[in-house]
Image: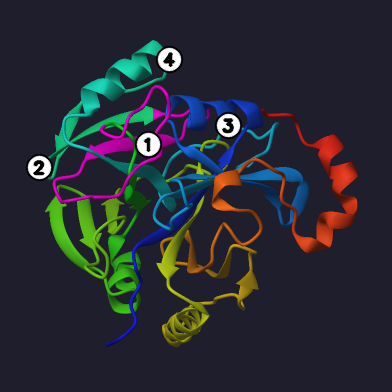
Amino acid sequence: MENRINGIHHITAIAGDAKRNYDFYTKVLGLRFVKKTVNFDDPETYHFYYGDEYGTPGTILTFFPWGNVQPGESGPRQATAIGYSVAAGSLEFWQNRLQENNIKHEVIAERFGERYLTLLDPDGLKLELIENKNTDNRKGWQTNEINAENALKGFYNVTITTNKIGPTADVLTKIFGYSQQEADGNRYRYTTDAIETANAIDLVEIAETGGHVAGGSVHHVAFRVPNEEVLMEFRAKVVAAGLNITEKIDRNYFYSLYFREPGGVLFEIATDNPGFDVDEPVSELGMNLKLPAQYEQYRTQIEKVLPKIN
């Protein structure tokens, strides 16, 4: 059987204040803080990972918190919304919780036969909590205030806004093995049946121009493969399609390739291996600052520069 993309691996976005970002995602949304490390290209900046108990691919949202970053502007050639799967009947809980914490949000709405609730994180990143009409047995991280029935299970989808969906859709269908499932106005949903969750991409076509990636913007979307062998198979497919793609990069917790799809969004293909417990046990995920080997000798200097978050 041909190897396929197994949905979304992780999504990486840009934030401002590190502690504000940490407090929102762990205390308000109740995600587990899976990994505290640094940007490989800017070691005086954190790289935060949030997800479920194990840091399972399909649940991982990561951030580069640059304290003085200017706000971005949503527009075409960007991933403009991140959808989380939640259990049916939980949106009223979330609506009340967002109100109690003074989080900007909209009224509960419906799309493709599913209720959803849109909110903005403190940097303006758009999130959507979606009552998944399909079975989603993933267990979200529980806190004292958020029980299993209401916890965020992991990603449902990501929305990509573009001026012309065709070239982006070609990457999804001809390289990644997705197919179009539904359409509503200028929104087209593509899914893969290679996996049951975190398997949807919505393409929204607009004529407007403008927008730029900065604070409160998605930096890149990573798609999931099981291992390095399959990773390199997809590299060959991307090259055959005439797109430029990086060599394999070791990100400590997964191996990656990066390329920019024709619509302008940075795509990554990332492996499941070796996982987030490669350098600390599952019980201690996120508790300690983990540095790539090349920066370990500078630990004292780096720790002095990084802001305190907890």
Q: Nearer the viewer, mark 1 or mark 4?
A: 4
Say whether disc 1 or disc 4 marks the residue closer to the N-terminus. Answer: 4
Question: Magenta residues?
Answer: 120-149
Query: Dot 1: few (<14), some (14–19), or many (≥20) neighbours within 10 Å?
Result: some
Say whether disc 2 or disc 4 marks the residue closer to the N-terminus. Answer: 4
Q: Nearer the viewer, mark 3 or mark 2?
A: 3
User: In the image, which disc is placed on residue 113?
Assistant: 2
**Cβ atoms under marks 2 and 4 closer than 8 Å:** no
Query: Dot 3: few (<14), some (14–19), or many (≥20) neighbours within 10 Å?
Result: many
The residue beneath circle 1 is 127
User: In the image, which disc is placed on residue 261?
Assistant: none
User: In the image, which disc is placed on residue 22?
Assistant: 3
Asked whether the viewer can see residue 107, the reply is: no
Total numbered labels placed on residues in the image: 4
The picture places residue 170, in percent across and down from the top left corner, at 30, 72
Could you tell me which residue is drawn at 48 percent across and 52 percent down?
55
Q: Which quadrant is the N terminus positioned in? A: bottom left
The residue beneath circle 4 is 101
**Three-letter amino acid code of the residue under disc 2:** Gly
Q: Is residue 233 left or right of residue 308?
A: left
